[in-house]
């Protein structure tokens, strides 16, 4: 006989008691943590995997943790839209600035599952002893080998792996709202399963084929509405655009940050006359040696552009050499108004002909060269 399961609505209602469970309880708390970029995939995989792993009793309710401050949630426009569609009140969600994971760990109460990453961010590394599971689609860094759950496979989306686990163990959990969350996320991550984007695996295709009939919306319609919301950055200033989807690493002696931005460089430069100053202010505030901005948009074809801001000329040249060696197929497109800036010597702007090189694929190349 299969173990009892909560409904989606019951699970969401149960999350309302998270703060009380953290502050007054003594029992272990199983939290599911996405990565620091907290894109749609990290949020949905954390939320839905927590739903999947939750039992019927309150003590068995897993808590999804969104790995950004609550104030940054508004920047994830497509996530705000899709969560609202699925009946998720953001007030029920726990954000990283609202739940003391380190305190729970010190009290011996934390059981942690990582989704959409398999290495904790440096400032969260103290939580490593609490990791009991990993579900991720990035390159396997070889950590947490003894975790009871360790599922690391190169799919287009971590949500594909979550969906596959549910299909295999509890397909009845794939209610319409859950199916829409998973399907929409996979479609965004794989650019609607477009082979040209070089992100789709057979598992991604199989899960979309299974989820779409349950999602209450057609594949193309779901992708298009989410794509529209994802690109809805009209109200964001340069700082918010840069921090909307951002990851940072210490690689050897270099502190490197990569922002993913969904606005064509031409449009960005046109609406922000102080763009270079904004880029430099962000780089300086983060203490970065290298700031890379990977621009991607569809208008009407999928397009990539790349900005490099590296004050040290030798480091900039080495970075450019690496990117050319690895076949990114770069062509200079630095707008004249940006070249006129006194900060422009450290700035390079390119079109990226190789559409298959995303941040996920670029970071290991940087690690190999500068690590």
Image (spheres, rainbow, N blue to C red):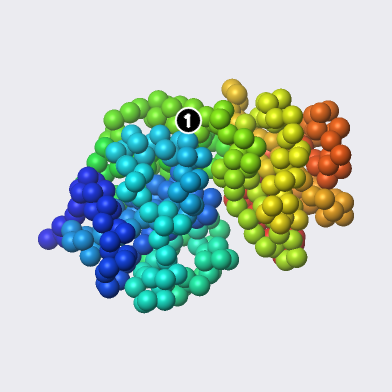
Quadrant the C terminus occupies: bottom right
Q: Residue at x 46, y 44 (%)?
A: 73
Q: Residue at x 87, y 42 (%)?
A: 345
10 Å crowding of disc 1: few (<14), some (14-19), many (20+)? some
Quadrant the N terminus occupies: bottom left
Query: At which x and y percent is residue 289?
Result: 76, 56
Viewer can see residue 321:
no
Q: Residue at x 29, y 38 (%)?
A: 87
**Viewer-proximal residue, 302 or 120?**
120
Circle 1 sits on which residue? 229
Judge left or right: residue 339 versus residue 36: right
Dot 1 falls on a residue whose secondary structure is helix
Judge left or right: residue 250 versus residue 73: right
Viewer can see residue 343:
yes
Judge left or right: residue 125 versus residue 364: left
Q: Residue at x 57, y 28 (%)?
A: 234
Query: At which x and y percent is residue 46?
Result: 39, 53
Query: At which x and y percent is residue 153?
Result: 47, 56
Total number of numbered discs in the rendering: 1
Query: At which x and y percent is residue 52?
Result: 28, 54
Residue lying at the far top of the rendered structure? 300
**Viewer-proximal residue, 269 or 129?**
269
């Amino acid at each position: 006989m299969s173990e009892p399961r909560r409904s989606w609505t019951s699970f969401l209602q149960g999350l309302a008691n998270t703060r009380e469970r953290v502050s007054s309880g003594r029992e272990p708390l199983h939290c599911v943590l996405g990565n620091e970029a907290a894109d749609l995939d990290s949020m949905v995989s954390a939320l839905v995997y927590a739903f999947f792993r939750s039992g019927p009793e309150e003590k068995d309710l897993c808590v999804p943790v969104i790995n950004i401050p609550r104030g940054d949630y508004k920047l994830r426009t497509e996530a705000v839209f899709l969560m609202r569609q699925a009946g998720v009140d953001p007030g029920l969600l726990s954000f990283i600035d609202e739940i003391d994971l380190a305190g729970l760990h010190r009290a011996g109460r934390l059981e942690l599952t990582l989704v959409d990453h398999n290495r904790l961010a440096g400032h969260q590394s103290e939580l490593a002893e609490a990791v009991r599971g990993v579900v991720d689609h990035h390159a396997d860094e070889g950590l947490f080998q003894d975790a009871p759950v360790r599922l690391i496979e190169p799919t287009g989306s971590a949500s594909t792996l979550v969906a596959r686990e549910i299909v295999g163990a509890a397909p009845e959990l794939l209610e319409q709202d859950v199916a829409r969350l998973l399907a929409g996320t996979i479609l965004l991550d794989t650019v609607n399963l477009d082979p040209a984007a070089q992100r789709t695996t057979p598992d991604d295709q199989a899960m979309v084929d299974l989820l779409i009939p349950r999602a209450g919306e057609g594949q193309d319609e779901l992708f298009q509405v989410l794509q529209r919301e994802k690109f809805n950055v009209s109200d964001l200033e340069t700082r918010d655009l840069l921090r909307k989807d951002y990851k940072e690493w210490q690689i050897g002696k270099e502190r490197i940050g990569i922002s993913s931005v969904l606005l064509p460089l031409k449009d960005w430069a046109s609406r922000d006359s102080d763009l270079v100053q904004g880029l430099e202010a962000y780089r300086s505030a983060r203490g970065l040696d290298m700031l890379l901005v990977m621009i991607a948009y569809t208008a009407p074809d999928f397009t990539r552009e790349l900005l490099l801001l590296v004050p040290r000329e030798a480091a900039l040249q080495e970075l450019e050499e690496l990117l050319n060696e690895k076949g990114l197929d770069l062509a200079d497109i630095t707008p004249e108004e940006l070249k006129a800036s006194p900060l422009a010597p450290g700035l390079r702007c390119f079109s990226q002909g190789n559409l298959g090189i995303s941040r996920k694929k670029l970071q290991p190349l940087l690690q190999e060269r500068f690590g």
